[in-house]
Amino acid sequence: MRSLASDNYAGVHPAVIAAMIAANAGHAPAYGSDATTDQAVDAFRRELGNQIDVFMTFNGTGANVVGLQSLMHTWEAVICASTAHINVDEGGAPEKLLGSKIIDLQTPDSKLTPDLINSVEWREGDVHQSQPKVVLITQSTEYGTCYSPEEIRAIADTAHARGLALYLDGARIANAAASFNVSLRAMTTDAGVDVMSFGGTKNGAMSAEAVIVLNPELNISGDLGFIRKQYMQLSSKMRFTSAQFIALLTDELWRENAEHANSMAQRLAAGVKEIPGVTITQPTQANAVFAQVPPAAIPRLQAHTPFYVWNEARSEVRWVCSWDTTETDIDGFTAALKAELN
């Protein structure tokens, strides 16, 4: 059954599978000392700059914990939106493993702003108070909204002026870059991001994420190798993870997949917004549509097409499109929704 629950439900893109099969030839050095991983790192450098360092990981939670750990001591804190994945969707892993405080800020669209960051006051050097160290933003956000490169630059400038690093949770960075029709570099390196996670899994890969150090002046790459190992994110047969990124970064397959998912979300939003009883609650900027629907209709619609209830109190649901979502999927669901509510 096709799903609108999550882009994690989608399968693996054929080009990614083909790249993994191609990497499955003979023996190769383990733990990232292989030619395929070297090629993947080179591909990332072509996209993000020659100064970067890349650390492959298994999943998004692991990538975020590893990336944040490289920037923080246990007595330091990370500032993020209250809806941030590290705050509500990672089972407390960041707090448990980092031992650090999360300062979550309320925001209606999941986006931080310079004013929100500056609203956080702390007594610098006071041992009685956790010391903010990192600002975390998500692209695209947990509400499907996106930061423009200019918004990211403003946040980076604000963070850096206060001595904070900027970390970008890029689980859906491809969808955000495609939404603004800009390069990955324009939205990360050139916008002042210091460290990021790069999501492959939601973009057609299989268990392929990466932590990328964009700012070499932080001098943390030497630590990251040890951090990744301690947090059990070092793959022995890394060539199969790396091969997936080679596929995604070749001829901008990442963009093709993201643009398709985004366009399917736009088609869905356009199809449902005029249906009585449906209220779209957020701008549809990436590959997700958020809407309020009558509570009684939700279970029957989920039987037709699986999706998540985002906020039960508000009867708000989330519909997520993937690289393999079809127009038939969207039109069939829209028709089912219309029939249910008429």
Image (spheres, helix red, strand yellow):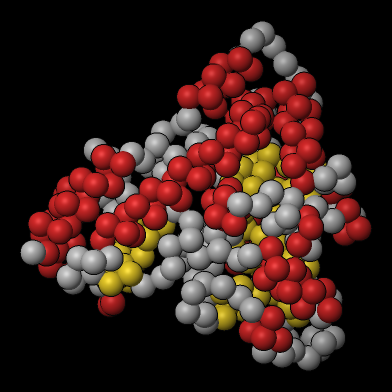
**Residue 215 appears in the picture as rendered:** yes
The image shows residue 1, relative to residue 133, as above or below, that is above
Q: Quarter-wise, where is residue 236 in the image?
A: top right
In the rendered image, residue 59, in percent from the top left (x then y), is placed at 56, 45
In the rendered image, residue 16, in percent from the top left (x then y), is placed at 54, 27
In the rendered image, residue 43, in percent from the top left (x then y), is placed at 74, 34
Residue at 28% from the left image edge and 77% from the top image edge? 314
Residue at 82% from the left image edge and 80% from the top image edge? 162
Residue 328 vs residue 101, the one in the foreground = 328
Q: Is 231 displayed left or right of 163 in the figure?
A: left
In the rendered image, residue 29, in percent from the top left (x then y), is placed at 75, 19
**Quadrant placement of the C terminus:** bottom left
Work out which residue is located at the far top of the displayed protein and give it.
26
The image shows residue 186, relative to residue 95, as above or below, that is above
The image shows residue 127, relative to residue 310, as above or below, that is below
**Residue 61 appears in the picture as rendered:** no
**Quadrant placement of the N terminus:** top left
Residue 93 vs residue 68, the one in the foreground = 68
